[in-house]
Amino acid sequence: MDGLSSQTFMRDLERAYNHQHLREPLQYLDFTLREREEYLDGAWNQDMAYWKNVLKDIPPPLPFTKHLPHERFLGVLQDTRKKILAALAHSRLLFGALIDELHMSRSEYHNLLFQTFVDYREGAKESSSFGGALIDVMDFETGKTAYDIYIDIADYTTGYKLNIMLMDSYHMILDTFSRRPTDLLFSPAIFPNESIGNALQLGLVHKEDPALKDGYESSLSYEQMFHRVQQIVAKLFTLGEKRGFKIAVFQERSVDWVCSLLAIMYVGAVYVPLDSIMPIERLSSIAGDCNPAAILFDNTTAYKLPGLDIKDTTTINVETLYDSAIGVHEIQATANNPAAILYTSGSTGTPNGIQIKHSSLRSSLHGDPISLTRLMASEQITMTAGTPSEYLNWINNGLQDLQRSPWKVAICGGEPITDSLIRAFRLVGKESLHLFNAYGPTEVTCSSHRAEITYSENLLTPIPVGKAAPNAHVYIVDSHLHPLPIGFTGEIVIGGAGIALGYLNNHSETRLLFLPNLFANPTAWAFMYRTGDMGHLLCDGSLMVGGRIAGDT
């Protein structure tokens, strides 16, 4: 009995239980005889002719993909409406009668004519009443059908938060096409573009969430953090229009440092970190290259300011702003504007400042291993990202802290995974800990591939880095940027949402490595990045990374 039939049965059963009038019963045998008479009398001839015409060119089942990149929404809508209404007008024809008329052989292994079945159960109810009692649907089995794809849709009032997200996406599409019905079919965005500042404001509705903490016993609630950010924001706005301007942060790592970062993004400026533990010569080089409009510092770094060798640059001690008044300012950041400039180490050549967009930004954690492992245990850290060398350092120096922590996810990248790292993770002895191998340079916002590693087993190295992440594309190309087949080694080229805006003050290098995406839909993400790494794709789509291309450093 199918879902709707069961609801009809329960409804009739309740009416009988309550001594209510039931409709005149129709036996199934009488129903089938009536259908056969209609078929023999020619009542279905027009319907049969319609379906024969629609299906006349359909061969036995073959896989196919239909591309509509250049179709306009209005045309697709009108064409779809016409086809659906015509199909519904001729829908009384029995499927079995059509198969017989087309002389198609039936199969127990696949369905005929189509392999995708969408069942939109309009009017399906998640609960019903019976004699004053409430009946809820606890489980529903769609059955085992010979379709490649079976989608069952029911409009229930309860569901997951995903439904809200899908409704937001549906609203965005509906709003776009209602205003511009002649737009290309795939042109509208389906998810809102939000910046880091928007996410900060969203945190205000979760004030009961754990506080923001640093390694020095300092903490702020989300509400306190937002107030502190607004104090710094108010000062930055006194400097004038700062959207797109670069502002450096030269502070000790603390809660205040995080607030400075968020304030910079809030006003639409670009964050440039000046890590106080780095040599002052390197920091001076970074400051000279990016030429920041202002530098935020604190009492612990004030004595180092002269070493930056900066001229005509505003300096602001954030510790003097605690008593500052705050105002109401709108977030100036947008998703596709630069959020931060991160400088490479220079191990692959001259250090370059990479401009990272708000929509691409990720975060990472690093520092001294003993403090980190203690922090992971005390603050109940469950997810980390680091290099194999860092993880080995953590396990060698803080094994007991890691064993008593709730560590669940370890993302590993930046270096090849070695046998010693696999053995080290076995030593941690946590069955709930999942290890992921990740790949992706800073230019693609840190990670484009991730694959889980079953480190409980003996593995052969090197280990694949997995398949491309959602919204990321990977290509293996030759020296002329022609794509290579699976298994052939070539240069790894990455496209998708995470591609950075390019190198700061290095237009020649940007033009050389950040290229228009030759393989993507022109209405999608437009650029791809040449990594300079060698690699090849496995049969399952996983990426195997080799070394650098000869001649690259």
Image (cartoon, grey):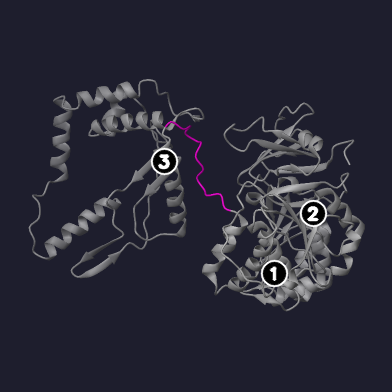
Task: Assign a secondary structure to mark 3.
Answer: loop
Of marks 3 and 2, the one in the foreground = 2
Magenta-drawn stretch, dominant element (helix, strand or loop): loop
Instruction: Check residue 417 in the rendering and tell me which mark sits there, or answer none.
Output: 2
Residue at the disc numbered 1? 430
Query: CA gap, disc 3 to disc 2?
Result: 43 Å
Give the amino acid at mark 3: Ala
Residue at the disc numbered 3? 146
Is 192 drawn above or below residue 108 in the view shown? below
Give coordinates of residue 473: x percent, y percent.
Answer: 65, 40
Residue 261 magenta: no
CB atoms of marks 1 and 2 within 8 Å: no
Query: CA gap, disc 1 to disc 2?
Result: 19 Å
Is 308 drawn above or below residue 476 in the view shown? below
Give the left or right position of residue 353, taking residue 202 as reference: right
Task: Assign a secondary structure to mark 2.
Answer: loop
Is 358 drawn above or below residue 108 in the view shown? below
Task: Assign a secondary structure to mark 1.
Answer: loop
Extent of the magenta region: 182-194
In the picture, the quarter occupied by the C terminus is top right
Disc nearer the start of the sequence (3/1): 3
Q: Residue at x 56, y 66 (%)?
A: 203
Disc nearer the start of the sequence (1/2): 2
Give the amino acid at mark 1: Lys
Q: Which residue is drawn at 40% across and 44% down?
A: 145
Give the amino acid at mark 2: Ile
Give coordinates of residue 489: x percent, y percent.
Answer: 78, 34
Residue 189 magenta: yes
Query: CA gap, disc 3 to disc 1?
Result: 42 Å
Give coordinates of residue 106: x percent, y percent.
Answer: 36, 32
Instruction: Decide: few, some or many residues near mark 1? Use Cα within 10 Å; few <14, some 14-19, many ≥20.
Output: some
Tell me where residue 195 sits by quadrant. Answer: bottom right
